[in-house]
Structures are given as structure tokens and as C-alpha cells.
Amino acid sequence: MIGLLIRDLRLAVKAGGGFGLALAFFLIVSVLVPFGIGPETGLLREVSGGVLWLGALLACLLSLDRIFALDWEDGSLELLATSPLPLEMVAITKSAAHWITTGLPLALVAPLLGLLLNLPEDGYLWLVISLLVGTPALSAIGTFGAALTVGMRRGGLLLSLLVLPLYVPSLLFGSMVVSNGASGEAVGTPLALLAAISLGSLAILPFASASVLRVNLR
Amino acid sequence: MMLEITSLACARGAVQVLQNVDLTLSAGEAVVLRGPNGAGKTTLLRIIAGLAPALSGQISCASDSIAYSGHADGIKTSLTVAQNLNFWAGVFGQRDITPALDAFDLHDLRDRPAGEMSAGQKRRLSLARLLVTGRPIWCLDEPTVSLDQENVARFAAAVQAHLARGGAALIATHIDLGLAEARIFDIKPFMCKKLAETDPFSDWGAA
């Protein structure tokens, strides 16, 4: 399992691995939003939390179809399915690798981009915390979506349609944590719900991913 | 008896392709699967490897005893030969990749990225993976595709060494591997083309 994680991380940082893609997208979205909204700092201040979360979510979505597609194309997925590693474990490892290469770096660069969006200073800590707590759910749900669409040619659109509605709760609670934190209100409830979504999807979805993979591998 | 198949029926998609297949494989034995294109050789091998369910019939073998190799090489092109082999060795709980490199003469290519290798060299790497699985039954689907004469001989030698260690092999191929002890198993008599009459959702609970 560690071997698979290391291999996936190594592949992600190699040329064509798509490691920088999500990060670059997040950066561009955050830089462009102020141009779209205009120079009103007050308005920007209010929407910054939600925009950052939305940007992170869309950036995450970009790299989802790579989770299983490459292994499917070159036959490694079949070989993994016949290996002693259970497919549930493969799914968890793939989610973890996806999170380490997208969710984690997104959470770490988010404060820099918060500066561009005029995020109130009390919001930075909660922005990083909410992204760290919330993005594992995005990776786990995305892995499930990727497993569902793995055999399809150009399944990217279907994948987005399947996954985006499932991302809504994380987006809601995540941006609520940031905006409540920024305005000094209590963040306990949305943060707890955000954590619950992450833990719940990490606990349940690897099993779902593994069983749809088994069906798709036939 | 390492592998015993009794009255197996298999389907590819919604079409049943084989019925009443009986096949046994004992230690030290190699069986060459023969049959016309589309007969169901790949389907049979995939079912034995556990990738697809059988329509009916039994397959009995020890758990985790089958190493499968399909049409695709399963190679990461941006990793080197040694990295690819080490990864699979790790997955199968093995450490030493030297015997695998020896068997398919991959020592000189050890640090070459797999993407820069020819199709035949990739195939050799893919076959070398079988040696790092440490599993006794090899299920190979057209293993000699894009191999030259010399490497087909190397492959045959690797299979022979595997049999000598008490392993077994089930190989779907059209060419003569030069394996004197190999038994030919023609699946032509078991072919049947008809729509499979099963409920496609019947195994949902089991999966």
C-alpha cells in the first residue's frame, strides 16, 4: 500500500503527471475573480471565503479523471485487482495520493490567494483549517466518481456531473467556516459538519469505489 | 491438483462463449490454450484470474495463487525498469528483483525509463513481473506478442524454470513455444454462441 502511494506520488510529480495543474488553476481563478467583481474591496471581502472554496473545489475536480484512467489504460488496474492488495485499499491509497497532490497544496497556498481577495485577517486560519478538513472528502468522493466512469472514453463530463452535486455540502460548510471565522462568529458547528462529511466519505466510499471498480473491470 | 475447473460456463458481455469447460492443472504442468479468434481464451483466463465472474461452474485453487498477465503490459512509462519491478515486488510482498532481471536479460535496461523502450522490451518487463509475484499459477494471455525468436526462447526457459520449481502455467498462444512438456488444450469443442440467460444484477449482493 505504501508502495502504491509512493508510486502514485512519484508519477504525479513527473512530467505529465498533472501535479501543478490544480494548483495553477486555483491560482488563476483567484487572480481573475477580483477583475470580474471589480475594485470594491468591501464586496470582495464578503465573497472571498466562498470564492476560495469554490476555486479549490473546481481545481480538485480537474484532476479527478486521472485517478484511475491512466492505470486503466496501461493495464495496471487489472494487475492491481489480481494482486494481494484489496481494491478497497487501492481506492483509499488513490484518494490519499490525490489529496496529497491536490488538496494539501491547495490548502497551503490558499492564504496567499486570500491576500489577493482581501480576506479579513481573522479568516486565514479558518481558511487553512477548513480546507485541510474538507478536501479529503473531495478526494474520496472524486475517487468514487472516477471509479464509476473508469471504462468510459472521455468520461470527464459525466464525472463532473456525478461528482459536483456531491461536493455541495462540503462547499457549503467549508465556506461557512471561513466566513464565520472571518467575521468572528462561532465556527464549531459548520466545522464539525465538514469534518463529519470527510470522515463519513473516507469510511464508506472506498468500499463503494472498490465494488464499482470490480464491475467496470469485467 | 493446483487448479481445477469443472463445467465452467463463461460469457463475454451478454453473449455466452464457452460451456462445460473441464480443465485441471497440476504442479509442474503447463497447458497451452488454443482456439480460434473470439473463442473465449481471454475471457476464460480473466475468469480464472478472478477479474470476471463465471456464469456457472466451479474454479478451485488456493487463494492468492494466480499471477495474471493480459494483453496490456501494465507498465508505467515514466518509471524505470527497476522502479516498475520494485513496485510490483512490493505489492506482492517480495524483495529481490534480480532473478526477474536475469530471466529476461533486463540488467542493461535497468535504469532506462520504460517509455523509451521498444514494444518487445516492454513485453519482457511485463513478463519479468510474473517472477516477482512469487505466485505458483501463471495465467498468461498471448505472452509472446512482439517478442523476437531469442526472447521467446528466454520466455520458454522462464516457464520451464517456473515448472521445475513446482509452479504451473496456463498460456493462451498461437505460436509454438518449444515447451516439450506442454499439454495442448483446445477450447473449440466448448464453444457456444448464445445469449446468456442470467440476471445481470444477480451478483450485486455478492460483490
Image (cartoon, coloured by chain):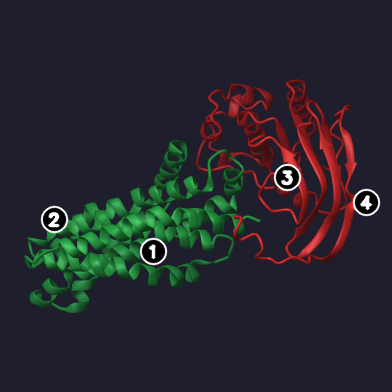
Chain colours: A green, B red
A78 vs B91, left or right, is right
Image point (75%, 52%), residue name = B43
Q: Nearer the viewer, mark 3 or mark 2?
A: 3
Which amino acid does the dot numbered 1 rest on? Leu
Is residue A70 visible in the rendered image? The answer is yes
Pointers 3 and 4 in contact (C-beta within 8 Å): no
Give the amino acid type for the residue marked by disc 4 in the picture: Pro
Quick one: label 1 or label 2, which is nearer the N terminus? Answer: 1
Residues at marks 3 and 1, CA–CA distance in whole angstroms: 37 Å
In the rendering, at what x and y percent does residue B165 appear?
73, 21
Q: Which chain's residue wears label 3? A: B
Q: Nearer the viewer, residue B7 or A110?
A: B7
Q: Name the subunit of mark 2.
A: A
Question: For this rendering, which residue is in front, B163 or A189?
Answer: A189
Are labels 1 and 4 on one chain?
no
Mark 3 vs mark 1: give the one in front: 3
Question: Helix, strand or loop at disc 4?
Answer: helix
Kindly identify which numbered label has been placed on residue B189: 4
The image's mark for residue A43 is none
Check disc 1 and report the residue beneath it.
Answer: A61
Query: Looking at the picture, how far across and down is residue B198, in whole percent?
Result: 74, 65
Q: Secondary structure at mark 2?
A: helix
